[in-house]
Structures are given as structure tokens and as C-alpha cells.
Image (tube, grey):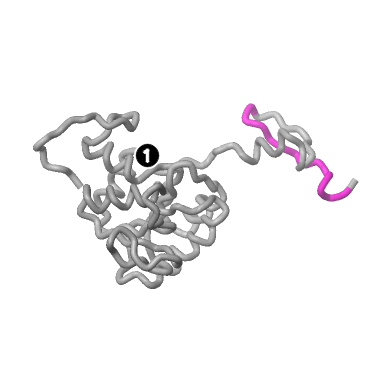
Amino acid sequence: MTIAEAPDVTVLANGLSCELPPDSPLAKRLRSERTWVGPSAKERLGILRKAKSIAIVGASPNPARSSYFVGTYLQQSSDYRVYFVNPNADTILGQKAYPDLASLPEVPDIVDVFRKASDIPSIIDEVLAVGSPVVWVQLGIWNQDAAIYGESKGLTVVMDRCIKIEHARFHGGLHLLGFDTGVISARKIIR
């Protein structure tokens, strides 16, 4: 038996333990289960209220991409200073695009990430290098190890959540489930 085939003792959620080869389907499933829990809704609201600037890493000049839509929303529906980070673009939504976080004119309060899950650890290292306090990883992107790593280094990590949906939901633009309410209101928007 090779080291790769040597069974590991695995403790299950019910407290029982068993030996599982690392490449068994159950071992793979247990490693893929989501156990990390990010900030609560109240904490996410606090993050959004406190922030003054947001950098969108992986921003795209393509109107069909979700990062473009989120950038448009943040420019038009918030008071945030929005920065676009994409080394392959000169401008996005009429603003200068920056090649990396270190090139930004200020340290952003939130770094919103539109990159594949395997890129998240290197993004977290870049965020740590510039000193941003919050990494917000977009809806559908999950890297639990990166989240745990980021938190261990003092970052606040939000993962698998859309910053546009969260902002709109907290500010009356979306129903709790994420649907446009169609409500037009004169009430003052809270930040």
C-alpha cells in the first residue's frame, strides 16, 4: 500500500470515526463540505455601511459579464469610490482600470473578487500586501481553505455572496430572496 492509499482516520459529524482511503468518494465528499461560515447578515450590513471604497478584482469591460453589471450598479446606486482591477483593460465603465491592487490610488475598504476559486489564495495574499481589511468573494465562488487562511491573517472574508444583491437587499431595492421589489421610495438610503 502506498502513502496515497493509506487510510486516514476520519471523525464523522455524529462522532464516530472510521478509516477512509484519501481517494475514496466519501473522503472527497467530506473534504468538499462547507463548514466555514462567514459574517452574518448584520455583520455584512456593517461592512457595507463602514466602507467608502471598493476595488473590483477581475472586473471586465464586457457588458455581458457579471462584474460589469455589479460595477455599473455600484457606480449608479451607491456613494462608494469604485476601482476596477484588470491588467488587460485600460478603462472599464469610463474609469481607468488598474493592473493590480498595489496600483490603486488608495487602499480600498473592500476588495470584491470575480476570479475563479483557485485564484482566491493569491488574491488574499495581494489584499494582505496592500492592507485592505475585507475580501468579498462573489456569488458562486467558494474556496474554504482560502477563507480560513484569510481570517487567520486578520481579514474579514465574505464568500459566495454578491455585493450588489446584498447592498440592494439592505437598502430596499431587493426582496429578501433577491428579487427586484419594484418599489420606488423617497426614503433616504442608509449606508
Q: Position of residue 87 (x, y in %)?
A: 44, 67
Residue 110 x, y percent position in the rendering? 35, 56
What residue does disc 1 label?
A: 40
> In the shown orientation, is residue 39 left or right of residue 11?
left
Q: Residues within 10 Å of mark 1 (few under 14, many from 20)?
A: few
Outermost residue, right direction?
1
| Picture quarter with the N terminus | top right
- Find residue 98 and report its horizontal and vertical position in percent: 38, 68
Does the segment drawn in magenta span residue 85? no
Query: Is 86 left, or right, of 170 in this rendering?
Result: right
Q: Does residue 128 show up?
A: no
Residue 98 vs residue 135, the one in the foreground: 98
Badge 1 marks a residue whose secondary structure is: loop
Q: Is residue 64 left or right of residue 142?
A: left
**Residue lying furthest left in this view?**
186
Whether residue 11 appears in magenta in the rendering, the answer is: yes
**Residue 17 seen from this side:** yes
Nearest to the observer: residue 143 or residue 103: 103
User: What's the residue at 49%, 54% (across, down)?
Assistant: 115
Find the magenta span and give its range: 2-14
47 or 60: which is nearer to us?
60
Q: Residue furthest top?
A: 14
Name which quarter of the figure residue 9 lies in: top right
Amino acid carrying label 1: it is Ser
Quadrant in the picture for residue 88: bottom left
Residue at (25, 53) in percent of width and height: 75
